[in-house]
Image (cartoon, grey):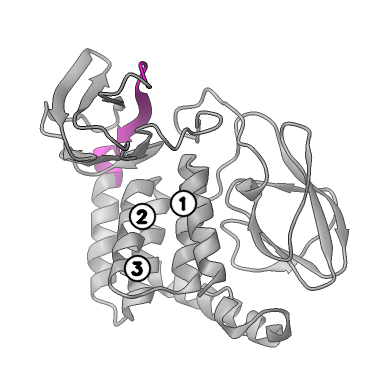
Amino acid sequence: MNRLLYQKILLISLFLLNCSWLFSPKSVLKAVAQTIPPARAATGTYTLIEVKGEVFLHKLGDANIKPASANSELNPGDLIIVTKRATATIRCADGRNWTLPEGISGVFNGCQVLRNNDPRVPNPRSPINCNSPFIISPRNTGILDSQTKIRWNPVSGTKRYTVKVWGTSGIMWETEVSAPEVIYTGKPLQAGEDYLVFVKDDSTYLTEGETAKFWMLDAQKAQEVREKITALTKENLSPEAFALAKANIYSSYSLFADAISTLEAALAKGNKTTAVYLMLGALYEQVGLKPLSETYYRAQSRT
């Protein structure tokens, strides 16, 4: 898989070099978020209804960037590239029209995500309250390790958080912590089972708490992932290419939390490239955290 990824990166890089007049060298879209498998919203559609001038579409999961055309259906994570003097308009799932700015945009940069009932696709609250302890991880994701790290948005002034994990049999674990993260140490989570994590702060502002769904990957697929990661470590890849390829393996199994953790670790080590920022933006879109996805999309425009 890593060899295929390398070939995709090379093809995209060659394409963008030929079109380098469209973008500044620091904004070249390489390696990129196309390595995440496409996910569709469970309700509503997003359509590119108008295209004027040179506009390009990068479908999530596609190795190629292609000229965009009107009436193209869009999915979460797709990227639209609007060149100078060009315009493009998206019909959002809620019926509103959004005219894209010049540059690179994700579908959700200007469209609100609609609610759905499928636990395996994003189902964010609308809108996410940035003053609440919304779940960052695990959120709409598979996990490999039963002792997963639970992270959430810190709430100013909060001294204690209540954290609970539910399974099909009821509450699996409950604890109170002062930091906005904790390692799950309750009953072993079962492969293939779905779970719900709940976090509530100690303020009077929020009374219901925040929840997110996640699941343990089944044993066979978990073994496949570990074998692919082991094989990847034997390849002579640069730190950035290794991080992107590893995140690609995780995301292809819907292990979005692991993919995000891998790329955020790469950023912490100094691999602050457009490809890493864009893939993180697409991953956070994937799990339904628009505020965080926009943070990374904005960051990539400054690289």
Compared with 59, 124 (above or below) is above
Q: How many residues crowd around disc 3 within 10 Å: few (fewer than 14), some, or many (20 or more)?
A: some
Q: Which residue does the image show at 60% across and 46% down from the upper left?
A: 76
Q: Verify CB contact (< 8 Å) between mark 3 and mark 2.
A: no
Q: Is residue 201 left or right of residue 272?
A: left
User: Which type of secondary structure does the marked residue at label 1 adopt?
Assistant: helix
Residue that label 2 marks: 259
Residue ID at (34%, 33%): 133
Q: Quadrant of residue 80?
A: bottom right
Q: Is residue 44 visible in the rendered structure shown here?
A: yes
Q: Are marks 1 and 2 in contact (CB under 8 Å)?
A: yes
Quarter of the image containing the N terminus?
Answer: bottom left
Q: Residue furthest top?
A: 169
Among numbered discs 3 and 2, the one appearing first in the sequence: 2
Left or right of 203 in this view: 92:
right
Judge left or right: residue 101 versus residue 105.
right
> In this figure, which residue is indicated by the disc labeled 3?
267
What residue is pinned by disc 1? 283
Magenta run includes residue 251: no
Query: Residue 49 in the image: x percent, y percent?
Result: 84, 48
Q: List x then y, in percent, for residue 16.
A: 64, 80
Q: Which residues lie in the magenta part? A: 206-221
Whichever of labels 1 and 3 marks the residue nearer the N terminus, that label is 3
Disc tally is 3
Q: Picture quarter containing residue 94? A: top right
Within-10-Å neighbours for mark 2: few <14, some 14–19, many 20+? many
> Where residue 78 sits in the image (x, y, percent)?
63, 54
Amino acid bearing label 1 = Leu
Q: Amino acid at mark 3?
A: Leu
Q: CA distance from mark 1 to mark 3?
A: 15 Å
